[in-house]
Each structure stands twice: as C-alpha cells, then as structure tokens.
Amino acid sequence: MIDGDATIFARATGSGRAAIAVIRISGASSGHILKRLAGDVPAPRRAVVRALHASAHGGDLLDRALVLWFPGPGSYTGEDSAELHLHAGPAVIEAVSDALVALGARPAEPGEFTRRAFSNGRLDLLEAEGIADLIEAETQSQRRQALRQADGALSRLYHGWAERLRYLLAHQEALIDFPDEDLPPEIEAGLVSDLGRLLDDMLAHLAQGEQAQRIRSGLVVAVVGPPNVGKSSLVNRLAGRDAAMVSEWAGTTRDAIEVRLMLGGVPVTLVDTAGLRETLDPLEAEGVRRARLHASHADLVIEVAAGTLPADAGTSRLQVWNKVDLAQAPAGWIGVSAKTGDGIDRLEAELIREVVRLTDTGVAPPMTRARHRAGIDEAVGHLQAAQQLALPELRGEASRLAMQALGRLTGAIGVEDLLDSVFGQFCIGK
Ligand SMILES: Nc1nc2c(ncn2[C@@H]2O[C@H](COP(=O)(O)OP(=O)(O)OP(=O)(O)O)[C@@H](O)[C@H]2O)c(=O)[nH]1
Ligand SMILES: [K+]
Ligand SMILES: [Mg+2]
C-alpha cells in the first residue's frame, strides 16, 4: 500500500441517496485539517455543529456539519481521527473531498482504516476479518458469528493454544537442559498427554469449521427422487412461489432450478432437480446426470417419493412422501401433500432442525476462513510429528514451528505477505 504516513479520508457511509454522509479522516494531520476546515478542534468524542469552510475559493461555506474529534491512540485506527457528518448531496461530498485534498489528505484505499488499526495494535488479524464479515453479514447467524470474531473470541482461542504450547516448550527445554538430572518419568509422560489433549482440541475445531463455513456461505439442499412424485410442487410450496414448472408429464424438470430461502436464520439454496430414471432422451439424461451431481455436492438431500417406494431409497436423513391425499406415507417417511399443504409445516420444522444441526458451532468460536484452516492444519501437522519424535530436542523444534503457525493466524508474526489479501476484502472507508 502507498504512503502509509499520509492522512487519509473516505466516505464511510453508502453511496445511495441518503440524508447524511459520514466522511472519516485519519492520520497525523487530522487535527490541523479539522482546525482549518471547521475553525477549531472540538473536545474529544463530542458531537458539535460547525460551519465547514474551504481554505481556497475565498473561504467558501461548504456545509454545516456535525463534527467529531477522536484523538489517538484511543481511536479506531489508533491515530488522530475525525468524522464529518455531512448532508449527503453529491456536490457537498465533492466539495468537502476537494477541500480535504487541498489540505493535504488523500483518499483512502479499501480497508486502509482497519489496516492502520491493525498496524497500531488496535486489533489483530482475526478481529479485522471479523469486522470485514460484519460489514458483509446478511443474516442474523452471520452477524452473530462475525461479531464474536470481531470481539476477539477466535483470537483468545488461538492465543490460549499458543500459551499451552509455550508451557509445553518450556518443559521440553527443561528436559533438554537437565538430561542427567533425575527427572521423574511422569513429567515426560505428562507432556506427551498434554500435547495429545491440545491436538484433540485443534482437531475438534477443524471439524467444527465446516459448520461455520456453511453459516458464511449458506447451505445447499437438493430435492431428488423419481419423476412426477411432485418435487417441483414441493419446492414451490417451500419457496412460497411458482419457481419451478409443474406438469403431469414425467420429465418436466430438466435443468436444476435454484431457490433461495432462509431457514432457521441460515441462507439455504433449495435445488429442484430432474426426476431420476433411465431415459433415451439426451436432454433428460443430461438433467438426470446433473441431478445426481447436485445430490452428491449438497449439504443435505431431500428424497421425495409418492405412491411407491423407490428401489434405491433409504440413504437421506430427510425422506418425504408426497401426495398423502392419495396414499398414506410408509413408516419413517414424512408425509406431505404439496397439493393440499398437508404436512408442510412438519417438513419445514424437520428441515430447520437439520439446518441447525449442520450449522451448529457449539459454544467454542468457529474458524471462518480457509486461511484459518490452513494455519491450524499446519500446526496440527507439526504437533503430530512432535508426537512421533522421541528426543525432546526434536519435539521442541516441531512445537516451535506449530507455535509460529498459530502466531500467523492472529498476525503476531510473519504476515506482511498476507495483509494485502486480508485488507483488500474491505470496502473503501473501513
Ligand atoms: N394429488 C396430488 N398431486 C400432486 C401433489 N403434488 C404434485 N402433484 C401433481 O403431480 C404431478 C407432478 O408434479 P411435479 O411437481 O411436476 O413433479 P416432479 O417430481 O417435479 O416431476 P419431474 O420434474 O417431471 O420429475 C403434477 O400433476 C402435480 O400437480 C400432491 O400432493 N397430491
Ligand atoms: K412432472
Ligand atoms: Mg419437476
């Protein structure tokens, strides 16, 4: 990133029509700029109304605005900062931006405010990622997950692991330093079992990460079954609209049809697919191939049948028997009628239960990014190697490498190369 010492500014609020636009300023000359623009530097963190004047154009009045002063190091970025709450007209924003440039500030790059906060130790890399997620969060479960990470829940977890490793290392070093002393064998056995427990915790966290990933990206639920059992009718029922074509002709659905809905606070993509059967029609055959592909990639499969039990039924957790208005559901199947609406509430409740099961991350904070998985995978690899090594010296080295991998997760060490990709995900003004 360019010119890290500059005083930067950016519009922190969205660009649509609005009553107010907030411009943030951060950097060493923020106070000086504020004084030139607003006439004085107000008391810290107090909103005051000021007339903003350009220093050029004979002191042209730009806007009457709410002004806030946040002196460093207690500000978001850790630097002297200010906020201007302007009337959101494009001409106002343009005039104030021009005045800020004339006073020596430059427009901020995406994520530059948060990057400065990171550089100044106001937050670590995991917390910064949490803030990026919070800005992107569209659902309540995404919001909760992001807020936990922004508040440092994940940082505390990884930091705790690093501390446990530091303790193990210190004791391993003691074994190296005093090899001839009569250290009780329990000490070495204790270290080995501590290491095992730490590894178990890390592996459990890795397993849980899949759930968190689903909260971030949403779940895919494929609806599959023989032709004409009412898959499309069922999808339309669940979606509450006529998303997919329905007809009495077997083989109506060819291309997969995706419907987005919210279930249990989680975004779900429901995929209606072609009825599964042997067919000579090349288009329908392609549809069947795609249906199987969707089913194999889905987080959850709803198996639909009606009238007769399909020969290959019996693998999905959600088996739905449609058309109960014509024939009763066999034991173990959820009976519904897409036609009358019978049983749909129960199906919805079962679906939500499955969605919650698939996205439940328990009490521990979940990892949310491929970067976290890679770092923990690496640490686990080193620790598993350490378990195999007999000599304390070698084990110590493996544990040290594992600790470095954990340190990179919070940004405590060696992350220069990572920063552009982490902060590049932010919008301008954050
Ligand atoms: N009686 C009754 N008919 C239903 C019910 N649900 C669907 N149907 C009818 O069953 C026929 C097939 O429905 P679709 O929703 O097209 O079935 P599908 O499984 O998507 O069929 P394909 O896409 O061809 O595989 C239509 O004529 C529907 O009106 C139901 O609950 N009861
Ligand atoms: K049909
Ligand atoms: Mg269909």
Image: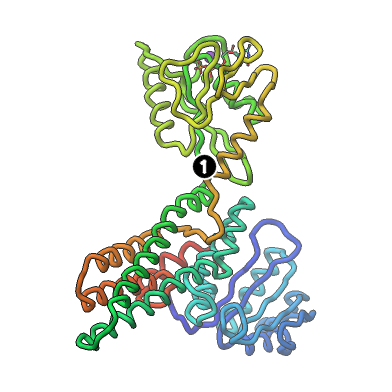
**Nearest the camera: 273 or 67?**
273
Side (left or right) of 253 relative to 282: right
Q: Which residue is drawn at 29% across and 81% down?
A: 184
Please provide percent x and percent y for residue 109.
50, 70
| Residue 86 appears in the figure | yes
Side (left or right) of 167 relative to 343: left
Instruction: Please name the amino acid that badge 1 sits on.
Output: Leu
Please provide percent x and percent y for residue 37.
69, 84
Give the position of the C terminus as an image quadrant.
bottom right
Q: In the figure, 418 relative to 303: above or below?
A: below
Side (left or right) of 394 relative to 49: left
Secondary structure found at label 1: strand
| Residue 60 appears in the figure | no
Please provide percent x and percent y for residue 137.
59, 55
Q: Quadrant of residue 11?
A: bottom right
**Nearest the camera: 15 or 118?**
118
Q: Name the residue under label 1.
A: 219
Number of numbered labels in the structure image: 1
Q: Residue at x 56, y 20 (%)?
A: 331
Q: In which quarter of the image is residue 232?
A: top right
